[in-house]
Amino acid sequence: MSDIFSRIEHSRTADEVVQQIESLIL
């Protein structure tokens, strides 16, 4: 989980966060 949050912190926009989460789920 820590890796996911670290990626979200590096992301610039909310859209990128959503895409990252979706990519992990899918």
Image: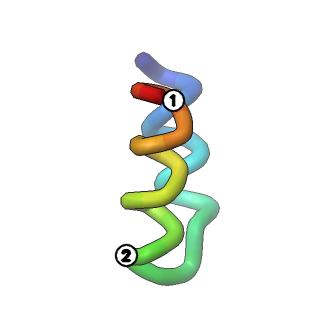
Q: Residue at x 53, y 49 (%)?
A: 20
Q: Quadrant of the N terminus?
A: top left
Horizontal and vertical percent position of residue 18: 38, 59
Circle on res. 14: 2
Q: Answer whether labels 1 and 2 touch (C-beta < 8 Å).
A: no
Instruction: Residue type at mark 1: give it.
Output: Leu
- Label count reads 2
Q: Nearer the viewer, residue 25 or 17?
A: 25
Q: Would you call the spot at circle 2 few (<14 residues within 10 Å), some (14-19), or many (20 or more)? A: few
For label 1, the SS is helix
- Secondary element at tag 2: helix
**Measured along the vertical axis of the image, is residue 18 above or below residue 21?**
below
Task: Bin the neighbour count of mark 1 within 10 Å (Cα to Cα): few under 14, some 14-19, many 20 and up.
Answer: few
Residue 15: horizontal and vertical position, in percent?
42, 76
Q: Residue at (44%, 38%) from the top-left corner?
A: 5
Task: Point out the residue furthest to the front here.
Answer: 26
Residue 24 is marked as: 1
Q: Which one is in front, 9 or 20? A: 20
Residue 3 vs 13, above or below: the answer is above
Identify the amino acid type marked 2.
Ala
Q: What residue is at 47 percent from the left and 28 percent from the top?
A: 26
At 59% from the left and 46% from the top, the residue drawn is 7
